Image: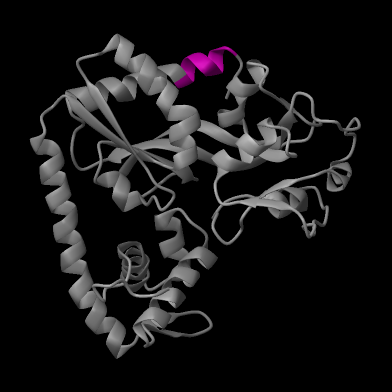
């Protein structure tokens, strides 16, 4: 990581550092930030390299701030707090007819945006702003009206309502040539489209295959993308087999754009949740959109969907 022209490191790296420094745990910080522990470690390591000094003393079962880390966290925390409060004031000054929703790019593209379009037909008087970022955190969600977080729920300071369980299975284009898949390992012989494990904090082919006790070694010419949206588009255009998340691919399958490949799926036990700050009531506009989203999910469950 190279410092910017201003001499300051990227803000998102400081957010990772602040979480670890406050919790004194890479594991707890990863849970709060909704990413893997390795992703947190990588961001903090890159930050240390860019600054040129260590921020933590790392021990087998504990972590402590260095003197430099103590100095940096003392400067960071008031600035981050002030920035959040400023954004909150600006957001609420825009009136009661605007609802902000923060979520990942894939959730925004495949799940949330179609629902915003339909909601705007029902309530044209309300405006829904979508903030999409893959560096989403529980604290960021608390700074917006609503958020969609992935995990096991129970984030401190947030109300959580489950939207859909995570289920992941292989997908391909309608005309993709493949034998009938009777065993997961048969997929190893096909052209697979992979998520970059260095850029993506969630499941990829290695994770999916390991659930079925199948060892996966990427081919030298494997297609690698850094976004779920790109892997799904590549697969839909016939470039190979990608992993599809049920909440994203269900409508594409029903519409004949893609098809499932084989009967195998991985239900991870994790879910996506609609979240919002527990310390303050939702605005009437946000409450209206929340009720619409929960109603849409419940209607889908009654139709046999998750």
Nearest the camera: 196 or 239? Answer: 239
In the rendered image, residue 189 lying in the magenta stretch gets the answer no
Q: Residue at 71% across / 50% down in the picture?
A: 205
Position of residue 198 relative to residue 203, above or below, is: below
Q: Is residue 124 left or right of residue 207?
A: left
Q: Considering the image in quadrants, where does the N terminus appear?
A: bottom left
Q: List x then y, in percent, for residue 235.
A: 69, 36
Q: Magenta residues: mostly which secondary structure?
A: helix
Nearest the camera: 158 or 230? Answer: 230
Q: Is residue 38 left or right of residue 76?
A: right
Position of residue 24 relative to residue 96, above or below, is: below
- Name the colour scheme: one colour
Nearest the camera: 182 or 236? Answer: 236
Q: List x then y, in percent, for residue 43.
A: 44, 69
Q: Residue at 12% across / 37% down in the picture?
A: 92
Q: List x then y, in percent, for residue 123.
A: 26, 13
Q: Considering the image in quadrants, where does the C terminus appear?
A: top right
Nearest the camera: 224 or 288? Answer: 224
Q: Residue furthest top?
A: 122
> How many numbered circles does the render carry?
0
Q: Residue at 64% across / 16% down in the picture?
A: 254
Q: List x then y, in percent, for residue 232.
A: 62, 36
Q: Is residue 234 left or right of residue 159?
A: right
In the rendered image, residue 301 lying in the magenta stretch gets the answer yes
> Residue 82: which quarter of the image?
bottom left
Examine the rendering and report whether any part of residue 293 can be seen. Answer: no
The span shown in magenta is 297-303
Examine the rendering and report whether any part of residue 144 can be seen. Answer: yes
């Amino acid at each position: 990581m190279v410092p910017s022209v201003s001499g300051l490191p990227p803000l998102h790296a400081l957010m990772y550092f602040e979480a670890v420094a406050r919790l004194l745990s890479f594991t707890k910080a990863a849970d709060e930030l909704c990413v893997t522990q390795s992703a947190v470690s990588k961001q903090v390591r890159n930050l240390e390299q860019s600054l040129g000094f260590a921020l933590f003393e790392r021990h087998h079962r504990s972590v402590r701030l260095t003197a430099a880390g103590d100095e940096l966290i003392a400067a960071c925390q008031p600035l981050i707090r002030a920035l959040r409060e400023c954004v909150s004031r600006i957001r609420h000054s825009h009136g009661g007819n605007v609802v902000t929703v923060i979520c990942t790019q894939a959730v925004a593209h495949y799940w949330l945006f179609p629902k915003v379009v339909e909601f705007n037909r029902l309530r044209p008087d309300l405006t829904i702003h979508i903030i999409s970022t893959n560096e989403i955190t529980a604290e960021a969600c608390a700074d917006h009206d609503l958020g969609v977080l992935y995990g096991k729920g129970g984030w401190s300071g947030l109300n959580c309502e489950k939207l859909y369980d995570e289920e992941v299975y292989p997908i391909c284009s309608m005309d993709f040539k493949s034998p009938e898949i009777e065993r997961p390992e048969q997929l190893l012989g096909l052209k697979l489209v992979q998520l970059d494990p260095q850029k993506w904090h969630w499941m990829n082919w290695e994770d999916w295959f390991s659930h079925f006790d199948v060892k996966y070694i990427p081919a030298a010419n494997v297609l690698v993308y850094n976004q779920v949206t790109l892997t799904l588009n590549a697969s839909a255009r016939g470039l190979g087999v990608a992993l599809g998340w049920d909440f994203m691919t269900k409508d594409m399958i029903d519409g004949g754009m893609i098809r499932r490949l084989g009967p195998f799926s991985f239900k991870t036990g994790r879910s996506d949740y609609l979240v919002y700050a527990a310390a303050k009531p939702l605005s009437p506009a946000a409450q209206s959109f929340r009720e619409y989203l929960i109603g849409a999910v419940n209607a889908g469950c009654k139709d046999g969907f998750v």
